[in-house]
Image (cartoon, rainbow, N blue to C red):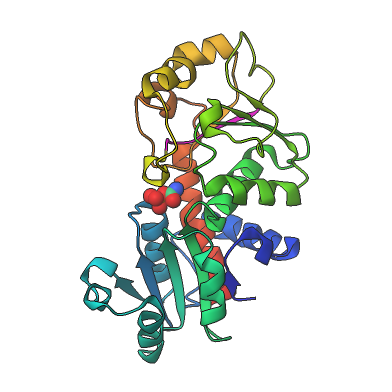
Amino acid sequence: MNKIAAISDLKKNFIDQVFELTTEISANWPKIEKVGNGKTICLLFWEPSTRTKLSFEHAAKMLGFNVLDFSPEHSSLKKGESFEDTIKTLLAMKVDGFVIRHPEDKISTKIKELLPANTFYINAGDGNYAHPTQAMLDVFTMKEKFHNLNNLKITILGDVNHSRVIPSQIELLKIYSCLDINYLGPDSLISNKFSPSFSSTSENCLAERDILFILRIQKERFKNTDNLNESDFINEFQVNNNFLTRTGFNGFIMHPGPMNINAEITNEVANSDNSLVLRQVENGLYLRAALLSLIA
Ligand code: CP
């Protein structure tokens, strides 16, 4: 197995192995086995990224890979070259593996078929289909805190419909028998397939929850039919100190980033003692290093 489009491509024992190696890398960083052996990895990001792209780049360089940073904006795609021909061209330049982010839903499944058997590939997010490494680093971070996820109670707040993180996260949490997940936010951002969901808050409604996983409003993926009154959203769902008092939430705050401060979350909450946001980012570096070590 050297191609990851979605969590469904992974077996539990492989994910366990990734998590074990992530722990080891975390404990020893920046000492790390140089398993890259001069192989070449190409990062192709059709959409902006800070965390995913730079953590893959940093991890790959620390592992001893050569890293090519392909910029679609400055490539021959602008002269009409196709996606397929771009990949073939890079393969002819002896690229050994790809990390690709793309706005098209499920393009990751087509990319898997396009690539030769010995070329590795990791989906760095496609449309709102999947973001498997984000899910892995998030679940790893949960496991660091709770070890056993069986009894974990997670509330996902905000724009679930446009998230590619959540479908991957739910799939992965299921593998670890974590089934107590509910959703909080306006109906326009949470479709019926995400259940149970709540479209308002009440006193102490989150008092028993362990993790509040907050999502940005992903306007770039809104369709013409989507609409949201942002000031209503902020009044009811912005996670600020008043929200925490009203809902009785006392667990850990998580957010995959990027955060829109003063929209879905305030600075005081994002930087509070209960926030795992920067730990998620740090674990993303270790986890992506572990994953590259195992699949390249
Ligand atoms: N969470 C996430 O994918 O962040 P970036 O867009 O910064 O990579």
What residue lies at 41% left-to-right and 58% top-to-bottom?
103
Q: Nearer the viewer, residue 51 or 181?
A: 181
In the rendered image, the vertical position of residue 101 relative to residue 136, given as above or below: below
In the rendered image, the vertical position of residue 158 relative to residue 17, given as above or below: above
What residue lies at 48% left-to-right and 37% top-to-bottom?
255
Indicate the position of residue 94 as horizontal and vertical percent values: 40, 89
Indicate the position of residue 108 as horizontal and vertical percent values: 52, 67
What residue lies at 52% left-to-right and 27% top-to-bottom?
274
In the rendered image, the vertical position of residue 266 relative to residue 35, given as above or below: above
Quarter of the N terminus within the rendering: bottom right
User: What count of labels does the image hold?
Assistant: 0
> Which residue in the rendered view is the most extreme toward the bottom?
92
Query: Is residue 44 toward the left or the right of residue 156 in the image?
Result: left
Indicate the position of residue 40 as horizontal and vertical percent values: 40, 81
Q: Is residue 75 magenta?
A: no
> Which residue in the rendered view is the most extreme toward the front?
225
Q: Nearer the viewer, residue 102 or 53?
A: 102
Q: Which residues are magenta?
A: 210-217
Q: Can I make out residue 59 in this image?
A: no
In the rendered image, the vertical position of residue 145 relative to residue 243, given as above or below: below
Indicate the position of residue 265 as horizontal and vertical percent values: 42, 26
Q: Can I make out residue 20 in this image?
A: yes
